Image: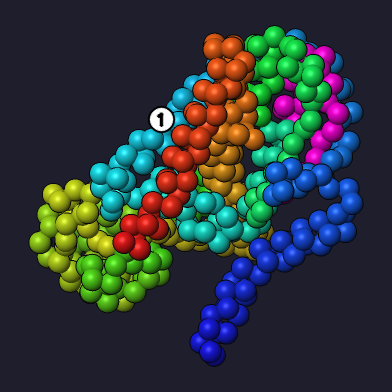
């Protein structure tokens, strides 16, 4: 019993900001329960008028440009729709053929370990999601207003633990508008998220990373966890967090150099892994993805750096902390904005891609047959999405 209570307590402490955030959300829902609109018994909408004046102002001021960009977004939206649909099907197919393959689809919440990115910090998540939602919904609204379609409300949507935002255009006028107009309004949110992701990655690689690089020198790499306790690093006793500085007689400055040197060695060979305190002798094993490639059995790898001597003053340290925080934020903003933008293009109910597919199939097949085909398509991709998310857990269970 004490072990269970200890586990629960440590879990709450670890995710204290997440718990506090959702407690505030629950308090908000209870306080505003009379103002909430419930849809399908599980979706709660809180309507506001926030941002409508801005939409009207900028839609009128830049009307021609907004309409043009909206039309460009239609092409990008359908490319994204087909791309993310293909990726989901291909990912599921790969996992069925090879159950040990890593899924490319996962939930992304604070505290979740995302392959290749590490653990998502709460404040990064909160600021990124707020920015993404603001850009996404403002784009829907401003394109609608540029086409002279009124926006009645903005608001916040609650779907279980998933938070979202929405704008509410005049549905009657939207359905009466030309198909290309409907497409441009529906695709605007996802297209703006993709553009935001591009801006984030450009700022990261052209500003923050180069500025950071001038202030530090690489020293090696570390890792956070083992893939399995029976694999080389774990068997050799190299604990997570150990700084790796070389392989055999070759010093390395980051994991990329280590990996390049490792490519010259084959499974079954013995190598020496160097650290600042001692050297470890390990026997390489086969990679689960490629039997000819060597495997270390570690994940969540991070390159490590030290601040150069000339930047050791207090103010330089503050600048470096700001640059490091900003780099981390823009990395997550890129991933989340791109991911949310593409997810919203899936042909599923309640997301933009579903409405785009519905309008297209109604036009192609007529209202009745088009609606029937749309429901078949959306049901198929809902199943594909769910299987992508739960398949790794099913493999572990069975």
Horizontal side of 321 relative to 55 (left or right) equals left
* In the depicted structure, whether residue 213 falls above or below residue 68: below
Quarter assignment of residue 92: top left
**Corner quadrant of residue 52:** top right
Quarter of the picture holding the C terminus: bottom left
Q: Quadrant of residue 145?
A: top right
**Residue 257 pos. (x, y %):** 29, 51
Residue 191, image x, y percentages: 61, 26
Q: Give SS at disc 1.
A: helix
Magenta span of residues: 138-158
State yes or no: residue 97 in magenta: no
Verify whether residue 146 appears in magenta: yes
Q: Position of residue 383 (x, y in %)?
A: 46, 41
Residue at the image position 22 percent from the left and 54 percent from the top:
288
Q: With 330 as the anchor, is 218 left or right in this view?
A: left
Q: Is residue 371 above or below residue 6?
A: above
Using the rendered image of the protein, determine whether residue 202 is visible from the camera's viewpoint: no
Q: Is residue 380 left or right of residue 227?
A: right
Does 329 appear above or below 397?
A: above
Q: Is residue 291 above or below residue 195?
A: below
Q: How is the image coloured?
A: rainbow
Looking at this view, is 69 or 140 the one in front?
A: 140
Q: Residue at x 36, y 40 (%)?
A: 91
**Residue beneath disc 1:** 86
Looking at the image, the residue that sits furthest to the left is: 268
Which residue is more in the foreground, 177 or 201? 177
Residue at point 58% right, 28% down? 353
Along the viewing direction, whichever of 109 and 360 lies nearer the viewer: 360
């Amino acid at each position: 019993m004490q072990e269970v209570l200890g586990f629960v307590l440590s879990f709450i402490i670890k995710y204290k900001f997440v718990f506090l955030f959702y407690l505030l959300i629950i308090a908000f829902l209870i306080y505003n329960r009379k103002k909430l609109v419930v849809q399908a018994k599980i979706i709660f909408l809180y309507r506001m008028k926030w941002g409508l004046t801005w939409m009207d102002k900028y839609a009128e001021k830049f009307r021609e440009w907004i309409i043009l960009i909206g039309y460009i977004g239609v092409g990008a939206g359908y490319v994204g729709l087909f791309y993310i649909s293909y990726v989901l099907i291909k990912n599921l197919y790969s996992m069925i053929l090879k159950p040990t393959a890593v899924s490319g689809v996962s939930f992304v919440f604070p505290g979740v370990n995302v392959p290749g990115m590490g653990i998502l910090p709460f404040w990064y998540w909160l600021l990124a999601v707020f920015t993404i939602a603001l850009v996404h919904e403002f784009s829907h609204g401003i394109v609608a207003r540029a086409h002279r379609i009124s926006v009645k409300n903005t608001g916040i949507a609650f779907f279980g633990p998933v938070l979202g935002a929405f704008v509410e255009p005049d549905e009657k006028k939207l359905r009466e508008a030309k198909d290309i107009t409907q497409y441009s309004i529906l695709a605007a949110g996802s297209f703006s998220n993709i553009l935001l992701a591009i801006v984030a990655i450009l700022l990261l690689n052209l500003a923050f990373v180069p500025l950071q690089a001038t202030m530090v020198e690489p020293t090696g790499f570390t890792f956070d966890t083992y893939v399995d306790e029976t694999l080389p690093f774990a068997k050799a006793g190299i604990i997570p967090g150990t700084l790796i500085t070389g392989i055999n007689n070759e010093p390395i400055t980051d994991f990329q150099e280590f990996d390049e040197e490792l490519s010259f060695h084959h499974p079954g060979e013995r190598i020496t892994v160097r650290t600042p305190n001692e050297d470890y002798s390990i026997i390489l094993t086969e990679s689960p993805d490629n039997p000819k490639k060597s495997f270390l059995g570690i994940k969540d790898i991070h390159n490590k750096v030290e601040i150069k001597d000339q930047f050791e003053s207090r103010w330089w340290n503050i600048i470096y902390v700001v640059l490091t925080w900003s780099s981390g934020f823009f990395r997550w903003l890129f991933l989340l904005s791109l991911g949310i933008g593409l997810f919203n293009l899936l042909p599923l109910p309640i997301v933009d891609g579903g409405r785009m597919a519905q309008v297209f199939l109604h036009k192609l097949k007529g209202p009745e047959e088009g609606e029937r085909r749309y429901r078949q398509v959306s049901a198929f991709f809902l199943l594909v999405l769910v299987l992508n998310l739960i398949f790794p857990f099913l493999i572990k269970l069975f």
